[in-house]
Image (cartoon, grey):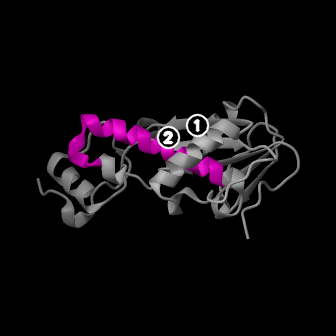
Amino acid sequence: MGLRRQFSEGLEAGTDEAGRGCLAGPVTAAAVILPASFSSEILNDSKILSEKKRLQLKEQIENEALAYAVSHVFPEEIDQINILNAAIKAMHLAIESLAILPDHILVDGNHFHPYKNIPHRCEIKGDGRFLNIAAASVLAKTYRDAFMQNCHKDFPEYQWNKNKGYPTKKHRMALAQLGPCLHHRKSFRLLPDQLELQL
């Protein structure tokens, strides 16, 4: 059984974010409005897709969507307003950037703040159940990965080309040796106690 295109009638924007659990880089959100004719045999939650399939889908989504937009909220603001509020703000910014105003918003997860007067619905694991949320998850993931690949050029020690800012063992080892850089989220627990340096 395939994914449903959307939840409600009319123009519905699916929205999702990537990067909430990272130690570095932005939290990135996308919003997508798909046409009724949209079809894909492989579109699903971006986390279970290969990078090759995500990039293939990114091209299809950008070519066929009625509207799409992607937004970042960066570490300095994440540290100020917390990661949940930052993720919701990124989704709001993406929706605000859509060329078409949706009639309804379908949100992955269980937290969202109302956007203007547009009705919304939260769906836990919606990125594996609705095409428009899955499409948003693919765009959020691919755009964020590309951003972290660029950051890697300036800070190769953290290996963001491989971990994309997530707390892998090598990422934490680099943090223990070098400390955080400007792309790290200072409000996050960057090192577990056993790796903290004794000064």
**The magenta stretch spans residue 174:** no
| Image mark for residue 70 | 1
Q: Residue furthest bottom?
A: 1
Residue 43, percent from left and from top: 63, 56
Q: Mark 1 and mark 2 in contact (Cβ < 8 Å)?
A: yes
- Position of residue 96 in the picture relative to residue 75 (left or right): right
- Position of residue 37 in the picture relative to residue 77 (left or right): right
SS state under label 2: helix
Give me the residue at 78% from left, 43% from top: 35
Residue 118, percent from left and from top: 81, 41
Residue type, label 2: Tyr
CA gap, disc 2 and disc 1: 8 Å
Given residues 134 and 40, the one toward you in this image is: 40
Neighbour class for label 1 at 10 Å: few (<14), some, many (≥20)?
A: many
Residue at the spot of label 2: 143
* Range covered by the magenta-colored residues: 134-159
